[in-house]
Amino acid sequence: MDTIAERGLDGLTMAGLGRQVGMSSGHLLYYFRTKDELLLQTLEWSEGRLGAERSALLSAPRTARERLDGYVDVYVPDGPRDPHWTLWLEVWNRSQNADDDARARQAAIEGAWHRDLVAILAEGVSRGEFRPVDPDRTAHRMRALLDGFSVHVAVGLPGTGRDQVLAHVTEFIAETLLP
């Protein structure tokens, strides 16, 4: 993951990665077949770690607003070249030419984030913490906002650091969800 984040997938060779991890490029290709498969499996591994963080967040005895803030905190990259977000950018870049299996795997990852956000929003609405919004529709809008801002943070656009993005998202939550 760190190597992909550091060099991008185009700057990564299987031979170079093999040297870095103590394997031959042939051995890596045996397991991953292509660099795109290596990328997707690395993203799935990374998402498994973040999924565990989200699960702990969702099961903690907190208010829906606290869970939402935690979700946003996990979602937004730490800064430019965030390794997890660099993986996502590489996957999205290659999505146009991906096969059906790769698209389904990517959709499964995206779907997990969406379902967790819908659950938080539905809980907040049912408890009266949030306005009576459509949780699914609001989750789509909020994830689009988070994705857009997160790309800006991950690529290091001036004026869109993590703190600025979190302030924008907090404002969006207040305007959209809070009674």
Image (tube, grey):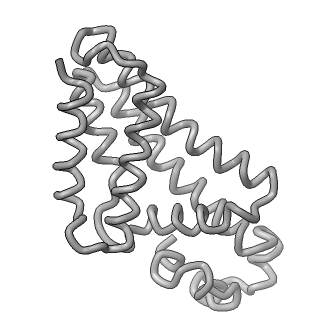
Quadrant of the rendered image containing residue 57:
top left
The foreground one among 164 and 52 is: 164
Residue ID at (81%, 83%): 26
Quadrant location of the C terminus in the rendered image:
top left
In the rendered structure, the answer to whether residue 124 lies left or right of residue 34 reads left
| Residue 153 x/y as whole percent | 32, 65
Q: Compared to 66, does 49 lie above or below?
A: below
| Residue 161 x/y as whole percent | 22, 65
Numbered marks: total: 0
| Residue 81 x/y as whole percent | 38, 73
In the rendered structure, the answer to whether residue 145 lies left or right of residue 128 reads right
Residue ID at (20%, 69%): 159
Residue ID at (31%, 43%): 72
Q: Compared to 161, does 114 lie above or below?
A: above
In the rendered structure, the answer to whether residue 69 lies left or right of residue 151 reads left
The foreground one among 122 and 54 is: 122
Residue ID at (27%, 9%): 127
| Residue 131 x/y as whole percent | 26, 16
